[in-house]
Image (cartoon, rainbow, N blue to C red):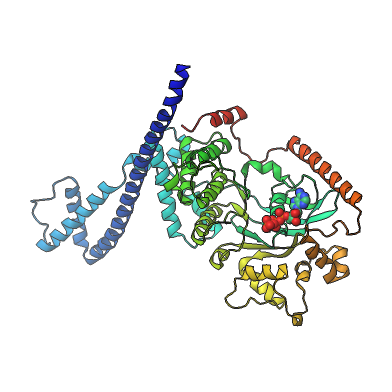
Amino acid sequence: MLVLLIIYNCSDQVLSSRERKQAKSREAGARSARESAQAQNKWKSNLASMGSQLSKTFSRRKSTRQDMQKDSDQNKSGKDSGLPLPPGMSQAKAKKQHNLNKMINESEDDQPDSQGSNIETGDKRFRKDKGKQLHSRTQIFRYAYGQIEKEKALQEQNKDMTFSGVINMASEFEIRPRPPIEVHFKDLTLTLKGKNKHLLRCVTGTLSPGRVSAVMGPSGAGKTTFLSALTGKAAAGCTTTGSILINGKSDSIQSYKKVIGYVPQDDIVHGNLTVEENLWFSARCRLSADLAKPEKVLVVERVIESLGLQQVRDSLVGTVEKRGISGGQRKRVNVGLEMVIEPSLLILDEPTSGLDSSSSQLLLRALRREALEGVNICMVVHQPSYTLFRMFDDFILLAKGGLTAYHGPVSKVEEYFSGIGINVPDRVNPPDHFIDILEGIYKLPASIGVSYKDLPLRWMLHNGYAVPPDMLTSSGSEASSAGDSSAHGGSLAAVGPDQSFAGELWSDVRSNVEQKKDHIQHNLLASTDLSNRKTPGVLLQYRYFLGRYD
Ligand SMILES: Nc1ncnc2c1ncn2[C@@H]1O[C@H](COP(=O)(O)OP(=O)(O)OP(=O)(O)O)[C@@H](O)[C@H]1O
């Protein structure tokens, strides 16, 4: 008993001293990497300015060039002073030349040492050895921060680079681009079993790698349902029709679950762990098991850096009883948990809700950076500011009843709606205006001859999609029933008002039984893994769960 008490009392101290050591190594690694990056930048700029100075001087006199070379050689060997001047060179010119040579030598000295360059981004030896040379924590952190500094510089240089440009750059610098996942869905329809109620209807479109898509629409339109359908989680209790193609093949989306990140509306963080421990737990369990430790450190540090979590990395996330980090930081940790698994497809349900404008922008910038590596990102977002809205590539606007009112580039949405006579008034945020229309809050003028209930049908006809006969019979009335009824539950063919109480009860019971049955089937059916990633086994994951990170 006494021994147990001693162990219990000492365990906290052991852990905190380990954390202190870890923090020290990290700081040392980060400092060294930053100094190395600064030295490299200085060296590069010195070299560039010297290049121009040299070419000017060289072009002036050929004979001087020979002398300069001689002088430079002498300088390097330490015999630069007290020597007779070369014939034809004045004292002033010789002094200038001496300074130039000194600069060359200084900059060569400043160049990062062999160990530093050994662990820089894209170092082939390091990549081949998979980090075997890096033993100490400081070395590992130095590698990670060296890489992050380099990526930052590259990003700065290539602000306006396209996805394909980044892929080329990535291969040049040996940055791993993610295996791309393109999701194409056609006539995706989800009907609640037993109730014959549509939650999604005839949704057609494509989510492409390297793009960030925003899903918006009135409350209850089916945005969360759409995200769940994309990740293959909507099967329980629903009949799904239509097709989903992954990279052009009709494989199950579940086969790629190891490379799909899903951030639900609710928290998925562990309140009793620190921010860093949360991220490490996710990374260790879900990254490839054979990824070298320095690479894992790099992934985690990169996410901490890009989500602005440095200040709170060692803070407890917190629970209801024990207050931890702020709500906005907590949201970012939730996103970070899925970012550290290096997903190819990242689905997020309202990650910016409750965040102020600058935190939302920070988060979106971090996601845009992921997209540059080829990640396909799709997220539900509520009332984004105009600046935030313009940061998305694609826009999916859902109407009530799970129908699509628009799906295409953000840059084209206003053009499309103005084509049907709907113009965004001055100083009104376009997505807010379209959602107000779909809610029926903003009344469209009769002169344009379009009711808000017709917008999904308009979209289908505009794209030449097949329209279900019931929607065609009367352009307004059927679609309108989608809008109206969904206000009470999102149904096109919902339970009729004349249905008896017993009938309603029976359909509820049937629906519940169907949902439970599907849920069990869904959990039992194993799908073939096509993700090409081997994650740690259950036992190892359990070990990670029991211990904290090392
Ligand atoms: N399993 C289910 N059983 C019954 N109805 C469901 C089920 N899942 C979703 N719905 C209904 O489908 C409609 C769409 O729900 P969903 O959560 O997708 O809407 P949303 O657009 O994400 O809403 P919000 O913006 O308010 O979060 C809602 O009316 C909801 O009640």
- In the orientation shown, which residue stands out farthest toward the bottom? 447
Residue toward you, 259 or 10: 10
Q: Quadrant of residue 64?
A: bottom left
**Residue for point 47% across, 19% down:** 4
On the image, the x and y values in percent for residue 290 come to: 54, 34
Q: x, y percentage for residue 7?
A: 45, 22
Residue ID at (46%, 59%): 158
Left or right: residue 194 versus residue 211 is right
In-front residue for pair 56/29? 29
Q: Where in the figure is residue 133, as x and y percent of width and height? A: 41, 33
Position above or below: 279 against 416: above
Q: Is residue 368 visible?
A: yes
* 93 on left or right of 59: left
Instruction: Please report the residue visible at 58 percent of the width from the left and 62 percent of the height from the top.
Output: 392
Q: Is residue 514 left or right of residue 383?
A: right
Query: Would you identify the image quadrant in which residue 123 lies?
Result: top left
In front of the other: 58 or 9: 9
Is 338 situated left or right of 4 in this image?
Answer: right
- Is residue 273 shown above or below 73? above
Ligand 1, image quadrant it occupies: bottom right
